[in-house]
Image (cartoon, helix red, strand yellow):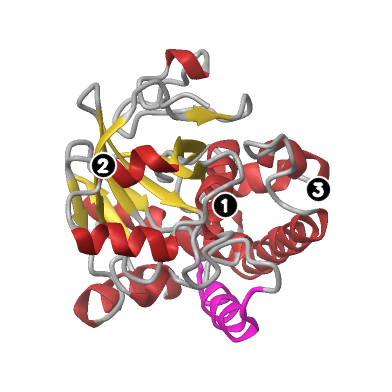
Amino acid sequence: MDSSASVAPAGQTVSSADPTVADSATADPYLSSRPVSAKSIGHTSYVLKVRLENGLAAVFKPRSSAPLGDRRYKGEIAAYRLGRALGLTNLPVAIPGAFPASAIRRALSTPDAIDEFDRKATIERDGSLRGALMPWIEHYETLALESGEARARWELWLTDARAEVPEKDRPLARAISTMIAFDYVTANWDRWSGGNVARDTATGTVLFVDNDGAFYDAPPQASLSRQLALLRKITRFSRSFVGALRALDTVGLAEVMGHDLRGEPLLADHILRDVDARRRAVLEVVDAQIARAGESATLAFE
């Protein structure tokens, strides 16, 4: 294995600012340059900020011994692929990538960082370290939407059909409504734990970040119940997002998710069936709201 990053043929890379799909892995500068520096930036999971030889920076979430670290990186990739299939540009680019473990270890600058790497990195038999590779977003700002006045505002917009959404706030309201539905489909239990919603200040785009809590095999049922309870309170949805959800099925999901670096399905069949069941549950919620309030009032966002 050489010292550059690699990606499965199914992986597509899109810039956070300019969603242009690369023609091939070799055309992508994030996949054809070696790491020259690396720094641990994770909290509950093992995450590295990697600077590449060509000057670009990326987030790398490798397989690790952290809790569920052997699979959390797949949540990022699967969420990105599903988001693109549903027409969403809010999901940070996340593609399956791999570096030689020795190159990452050499790129770490402190003994503590090297010790953490030795304890947490799950290295393949061929000496590679695989995971999710995400281009670094330079103009990144965390949105505090979990509690307080901010949450009270968006909950009013989305749960009270009589509330008026100010025109300037409609993009944010639409993004939160879609995020709540998307998170239930993906079973992402970790959205509201703090710092998992952000904005790209260069474009104003609300970003659904940190999706490594999604697509678990047997997701936390208590979390799913809370998500569904919140979803059932929502009165306003995105017409285009709901339409994309309706067009997807189990076969389409398998095609969307594709394969990992080894050519194996990214997600197991039973996980895809659970995703599809939650997709149908979201549509049942939407259809029930349409029956109560009408289509135009329910599909209130573009």
Task: Report whether 157 appears left or right of 202.
Answer: right
Q: Residue at x 36, y 76 (%)?
A: 193
What amino acid is found at the position of numbered circle 3 in the picture? Thr
Q: What residue did someone put label 2 on?
A: 107
Image location of residue 174, percent across then percent down: 40, 54
Q: Is residue 267 above or below residue 283?
A: above
Q: Is residue 84 above or below residue 172?
A: above
In the rendered structure, which disc, 3 or 1, sits on the residue that comes first in sequence? 1
Q: Amino acid at mark 1?
A: Lys
Dot 1 falls on a residue whose secondary structure is helix
- The span shown in magenta is 219-236
Name the residue at 36% across, 58% down: 117
**Element class at badge 3:** helix
Instruction: Name the residue carrying label 3.
Output: 250
Q: Is residue 16 visible?
A: yes
Q: Nearer the viewer, residue 263 or 216?
A: 263
Where residue 255 appears, x then y in whole percent? 74, 36
Q: Tags 2 and 1 in contact by the CB under 8 Å rule?
A: no
How far is the residue under mark 3 from the one under mark 1?
Answer: 18 Å
What is the CA distance from the residue labelled 3 to the residue labelled 2?
42 Å
Question: Magenta includes 233?
Answer: yes
Q: Amino acid at mark 2?
A: Ala
Residue 233 position, x and y percent, is 52, 77
What's the magenta bit mostly, secondary-structure-wise? helix
Instruction: From the image, tell me which residue sits under label 1.
Output: 74
Q: Residue at x 51, y 13 (%)?
A: 23
Where residue 3 appears, as percent x and y from the top left, is 41, 27
Indicate yes or no whether the magenta region holds residue 181.
no
Residue at x 47% of width, y 21% of height: 21
